[in-house]
C-alpha cells in the first residue's frame, strides 16, 4: 500500500463496509455516516463532520434528494 492509498480512509471504509457492485443500490446518507462514525471509533480516529463526509462521498457517488430531509447516495449500500 502506498502513502496515498493508506491515507484514503474513506476508500478503505467503502472497501470494508460497503457494496458498490450494484449501480442501482441506494443508501441513506445518514445511515452511511452513522456506520462510518462507528468504524472510525473502532480505529480510535475522529470522524469528519457529516457535511464533510457527505462532500467526500459525493466525489465518488451521486447524491440524490428523495424527499425533504432524505438524502441518498446511488451505487452504494452497506454490507
Image (spheres, helix red, strand yellow):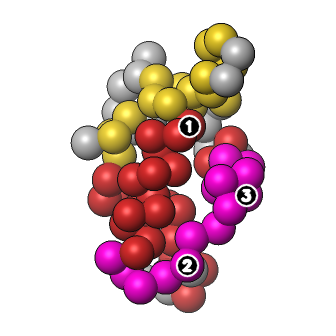
* Residue shown at the point (40%, 53%) measured from the top left: 35
**Separation of marks 2 and 1 at Cα, in angstroms:** 19 Å
- Disc sitting over residue 16 in the figure: none
Residue 19, how many percent across, how many down?
Answer: 33, 40
**Separation of marks 1 and 3 at Cα, in angstroms:** 12 Å
Residue 11, how many percent across, how many down?
Answer: 49, 61
**Quadrant of the image containing the C terminus:** top left
Viewer-closest of 10 and 49: 49
Q: Earlier in the sequence, mark 1 or mark 3?
A: 1
Please report the bounds of the magenta region as a residue range: 42-56
Q: Which residue is mark 3?
A: 52
Residue 77, how many percent across, how many down?
Answer: 38, 34
Q: Are marks 2 and 1 in contact (CB under 8 Å)?
A: no
Q: Is residue 71 above or below residue 38?
A: above
Q: Secondary structure at mark 1?
A: helix
Q: Earlier in the sequence, mark 2 or mark 1?
A: 1
* Residue shown at the point (37%, 81%) measured from the top left: 43
Does residue 77 show up magenta in the picture?
A: no
Q: Is residue 68 left or right of residue 47?
A: right
Q: Which residue is mark 2?
A: 46
Q: Earlier in the sequence, mark 2 or mark 3?
A: 2
Q: Secondary structure at mark 3?
A: helix
Q: Are marks 1 and 3 in contact (CB under 8 Å)?
A: no
Q: How many discs mark residues in the rendered view?
A: 3
- Asked if residue 10 shows in the view, the reply is yes
Residue 18, how many percent across, how many down?
Answer: 35, 46
Q: Which residue is mark 1?
A: 29
Q: Is residue 67 above or below residue 69?
A: above
Amino acid at each position: 500500500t502506498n502513502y496515498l492509498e493508506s491515507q484514503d480512509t474513506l476508500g478503505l471504509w467503502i472497501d470494508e463496509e460497503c457494496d458498490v457492485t450494484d449501480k442501482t443500490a441506494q443508501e441513506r446518507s445518514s445511515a452511511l455516516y452513522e456506520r462510518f462514525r462507528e468504524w472510525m471509533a473502532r480505529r480510535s480516529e475522529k470522524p469528519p463532520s457529516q457535511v464533510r463526509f457527505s462532500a467526500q462521498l459525493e466525489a465518488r457517488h451521486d447524491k440524490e434528494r428523495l424527499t425533504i430531509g432524505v438524502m441518498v447516495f446511488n451505487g452504494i449500500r452497506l454490507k
